[in-house]
């Protein structure tokens, strides 16, 4: 009886793929062999394969990825055309710009797990808004951006114009009003990179962010007369539906598809992935393909109906993914995982 032929080990295949890449990719290929580490590398390879086939990638940002300075890697991904659309929370939209103009005033609190209520009150008294181990300075960051964007809100309101939240941010970045306040290398701002590319962007639930609260306050006082001067989430969904339909049609001729790279859970991920079943079931655009790649970085648990922690196969039942769609889930910290995946995709 003939002995079975030994199958090639994944680490050998990964080493071959990393041979022409940089040291980070070589490190991943050598060390990331099992469990979440292997899932990370599989998702990175899948991302790369998806783009090589002519596909586009939509990236979603939940949590506080901008305050975590994901822009250091994400901005380069955008500039290298590795990201073709972004869906993010209002917090991520604004916090990249907060960091851009006030980085030197931020404070890190490594011992944040041991802060008492009294310690937190002291931070409040100093107008330092804590996000885990990082404090955002209200006056240098939030109020500075508020002043700049409020001018645009008021001007648009008086002119009867309406724009999306990200379009107002693009305007102030392109207008150069903030340049004198930059405190980081502009190459590390993903919002600057997105504004340069005029990247399609969708920001559902913007009103729960700091600037959204500030805008609501101006509506309540009457300073903003038309509540819809800033366009809404329903309008974002309509625009996303058109972007997906047109992009999918163009890609179909080249065999490419649209991928979905989800960082965290919540509305940033839930909002855009619904666009495909909406197109199929509500608009009868049955020729529009499903998402062609799916990866999620999350530490949410699969229990008690947690959609953020749902395994990708559950999305098949909702008409979002297909049985053969490449699917990956990395149950880990996105601040660690995402830059490594991006490094692989960029060949670092």
Image: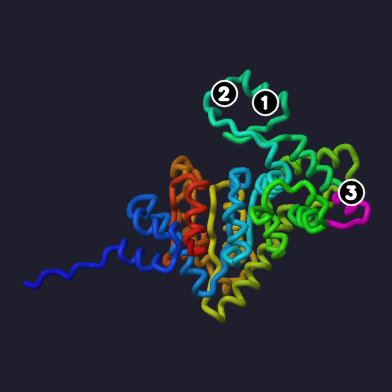
Q: Is residue 125 left or right of residue 325?
A: right
Q: Is residue 73 visible?
A: yes
Toward which corner of the image does residue 105 lie, by quadrant? Answer: top right
Q: Earlier in the sequence, mark 3 or mark 1?
A: 1
Q: Is residue 75 left or right of residue 239?
A: left
Q: Which residue corresponds to the image point at 42% horizontal and 55% vertical from the top-left?
A: 40
**Residue named by callout 1:** 123
Q: Is residue 90 visible?
A: no
Give how far across and how far down residue 21 sits, in percent: 44, 65
Residue most toward the left?
1
**Residue named by callout 3:** 154
Give how far across and how far down residue 328 sits, in percent: 44, 57
Q: Which residues are magenta?
A: 152-163
**Residue named by callout 2:** 115
Mark 2 closeness class: few <14, some 14–19, many ≥20 residues within 10 Å: few
Choose between 60 and 76: the one closer to the eye. Answer: 76
Q: Which residue corresponds to the image point at 72% horizontal and 26% vertical from the top-left?
A: 126
- The kind of secondary structure element at disc 2 is loop
Question: Which circle, 2 or 3, is nearer the viewer?
Answer: 2
Colour basis: rainbow
Q: Which residue corresponds to the image point at 71% horizontal and 46% vertical from the top-left?
A: 183
The reply to whether the magenta stretch includes residue 278 is: no
Toward which corner of the image does residue 55 lie, by quadrant? Answer: bottom right
Question: How far apart, in angstroms, are the residues tagged by discs 2 and 3?
Answer: 40 Å
Mark 3 closeness class: few <14, some 14–19, many ≥20 residues within 10 Å: some
Tags 2 and 1 touching, CB below 8 Å: yes
Choose between 122 and 59: the one closer to the eye. Answer: 122
* Most frequent secondary structure within the magenta stretch: helix
Q: Is residue 135 above or below residue 19?
A: above
- The kind of secondary structure element at disc 3 is helix
């Amino acid at each position: 009886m003939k002995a079975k032929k030994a199958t090639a080990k994944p680490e050998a295949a990964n080493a071959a793929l990393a041979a022409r890449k940089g040291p980070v990719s070589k490190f991943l290929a050598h060390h990331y062999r099992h469990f979440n580490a292997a899932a990370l590398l599989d998702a990175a390879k899948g991302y790369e394969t998806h783009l090589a086939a002519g596909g586009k990638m939509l990236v979603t940002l939940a949590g506080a990825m901008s305050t975590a300075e994901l822009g250091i890697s994400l901005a380069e991904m955008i500039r290298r055309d590795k990201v073709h659309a972004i869906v993010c929370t209002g917090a991520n939209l604004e916090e990249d710009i907060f960091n851009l103009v006030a980085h030197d005033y931020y404070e890190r609190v490594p011992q944040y797990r041991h802060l008492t209520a009294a310690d937190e009150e002291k931070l409040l008294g100093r107008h330092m808004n804590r996000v885990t181990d990082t404090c955002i300075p209200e006056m240098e960051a939030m109020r500075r951006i508020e002043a700049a964007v409020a001018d645009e809100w008021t001007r648009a309101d008086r002119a009867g114009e309406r724009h999306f939240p990200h379009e107002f941010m693009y305007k102030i970045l392109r207008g150069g009003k903030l340049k004198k306040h930059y405190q980081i290398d502009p190459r590390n701002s993903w919002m600057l990179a997105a504004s340069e590319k005029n990247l399609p962007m969708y920001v559902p639930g913007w009103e729960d962010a700091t600037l959204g609260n500030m805008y609501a306050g101006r509506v309540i006082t009457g300073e903003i007369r038309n509540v819809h001067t800033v366009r809404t989430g329903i309008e974002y969904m309509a625009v996303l539906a058109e972007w997906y339909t047109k992009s999918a049609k163009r890609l179909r001729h080249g065999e490419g598809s649209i991928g979905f790279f989800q960082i965290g859970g919540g509305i940033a991920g839930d909002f855009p992935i619904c666009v495909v079943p909406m197109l199929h079931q509500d608009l009868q655009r049955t020729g529009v393909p499903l998402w062609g790649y799916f990866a999620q970085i999350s530490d949410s648990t699969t229990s008690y109906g947690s959609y953020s922690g749902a395994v990708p196969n559950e999305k098949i039942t909702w008409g979002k993914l297909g049985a053969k769609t490449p699917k990956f889930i990395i149950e880990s910290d996105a601040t660690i995982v995402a830059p490594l995946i991006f490094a692989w995709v960029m060949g670092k």
